[in-house]
Image (cartoon, helix red, strand yellow):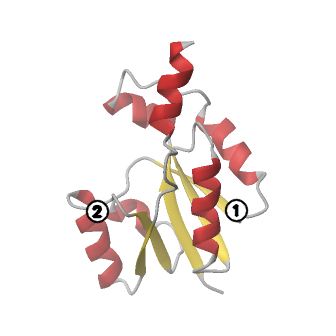
Amino acid sequence: MSRILTFGVFDYFHIGHLRLFKQCKEYADYLIVAVQEGDYILKYKPDAHILYTTFERVEMLESLRIVDRVVIYNSVCPETLERIDFDILALGEEHRGGRFEIVEAWCREHGKQVVRLKRTPGICSSDIKKELLKT
């Protein structure tokens, strides 16, 4: 059985997230979704508006049939990857440079595959947040 891992905040859950998970399942049998810890987000983005707590986001994702396991992480880095048993790392097409180069190199060194998945056009959590905050 192959295991695929994807990362995100998943606070304003939307159709783009669901389609990401469906794309992941095209590459592997078992989907691991890593949810970023809320306090860690606020440490680096103190003005971030987080709708749900970390554990509420985990609960929502765990309730989806398509998701096999949910884990909590702080940062996408080799230390995080080392503690998760996976075969394939799913990154968004926009996840390039900086820490993502480091993560990709770690995956290559450890025999992990990296796939780039497309975003759903016109769907963005940041835009949803802005729209909701207007009201």
Please say if 29 is above or below 10. below
Q: Quadrant of residue 2?
A: bottom right
Placement of 132 over or under 52, stated as above or below: above
Is residue 125 found left or right of 12 in the rendered image? left
**Above or below, comparing residue 75 to residue 66 in the picture:** above
At which x and y percent is residue 104? 30, 72
Q: Residue furthest left?
A: 98
The percent position of residue 19, horizontal first and vertical second, equals 62, 60
Residue at x-position 51% and y-position 14%: 134
Q: In the rendered structure, find residue 26 and report the number of the disc placed on it.
A: none
Tell me the residue at 72%/44% (across/down): 60
- Badge 1: how crowded within 10 Å, few (<14), some, or many (20+)? some
Residue to which mark 2 is pinned: 100
Lateral position of residue 126 relative to residue 99, left or right = right
Q: Quadrant of the C terminus?
A: top right
Secondary structure beneath dot 1 equals: loop
* Whole-percent x, y for residue 59 in the image: 72, 44
The amino acid at mark 1 is Val
| Rendered residue at 42%/69% (across/down) | 82
For the view shown, which residue lies furthest in the front direction? 122
Checking the image for residue 67, the label placed there is 1
